[in-house]
Amino acid sequence: MSLDSILRSRTHAKPPRRTIAGSSRAHEDLQTAALTLLALWKIPATALYTGPRVRPRAEGGFELRRNRSNVGISDIMACLPPHGLLALIECKTGKARRTPQQIEQHNRFRAAGAHCLVIRTVDELERDLRPRRGVCRKCGCTQERACPGGCAWADETETLCTRCA
């Protein structure tokens, strides 16, 4: 069973819309799917909105413009357990890349300890945030840095310690 089918079954969502890679609709769908996955994992997250990049033309149609007044840091901000680590998640579709301003902001936040991700699919987000073997998913202890007073692994996957079980 694929991650997309799991998300649809758990959220009673409609099948994904056909979208053009790189379109604002594809971006919106990726952002919504990422927020849904984070909600399923009970990770607090919110979409960051920096204003429209498309504006209507007087003569009809739309004009793609640079949004210089509000340079976006990322599309999603989340608070990762167990210690409340800040995660900035940038959703990219098609051939889109981070702007130099976004790269600079991500580097500044990463230097301060934040987790900065660029995702093109929900599967990438799942892979990057999946609990890792040897690290407790609740308190963050490891084999080398056990809980005060000691602990052991409570499960075979080594992702939950006995103090948190």
Image (cartoon, helix red, strand yellow):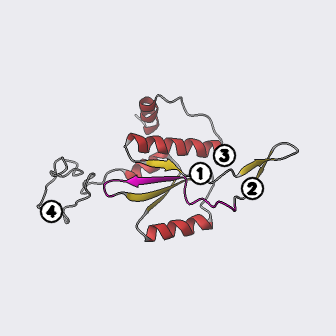
Label 3, secondary structure: give it: loop
- Say whether residue 50 is left or right of residue 117: right
Give the Cα separation between the discs numbered 2 and 4: 54 Å
Give the Cα separation between the discs numbered 2 and 3: 14 Å
Q: Are marks 3 and 1 in contact (CB under 8 Å)?
A: no
Give the Cα separation between the discs numbered 2 and 1: 16 Å
Instruction: Work out whether residue 40 or residue 132 is closer to the camera in this orientation and state it.
Output: 40
Q: How packed is label 1: few (under 14 Cα within 10 Å), some, or many (20 or more)?
A: few
Instruction: Work out whether residue 4 or residue 81 is closer to the camera in this orientation and state it.
Output: 81
First of labels 4, 1 by sequence position: 1
Q: Which residues are magenta?
A: 68-83
* Residue that label 4 marks: 148
Say which amino acid is labelled 3: Ser
- Say whether residue 148 is left or right of residue 66: left
| Residue 77 highlighted magenta (yes or no) | yes
- Residue 25 spot, x, y in % from top left: 63, 42
First of labels 2, 3 by sequence position: 3
* Residue that label 2 marks: 65
- Say whether residue 134 is left or right of residue 62: left
Disc on res. 49: 1
Q: How packed is label 3: few (under 14 Cα within 10 Å), some, or many (20 or more)?
A: some
In this rendering, the label closer to the viewer, 3 or 1: 1
First of labels 3, 1 by sequence position: 3
Say which amino acid is labelled 1: Tyr
- Residue 85 spot, x, y in % from top left: 38, 59
Q: Are marks 2 and 4 in contact (CB under 8 Å)?
A: no
First of labels 2, 1 by sequence position: 1
Q: Are marks 2 and 1 in contact (CB under 8 Å)?
A: no
Q: Are marks 4 and 1 in contact (CB under 8 Å)?
A: no
Give the Cα separation between the discs numbered 4 and 3: 50 Å
Instruction: Work out whether residue 53 or residue 25 is closer to the camera in this orientation and state it.
Output: 53
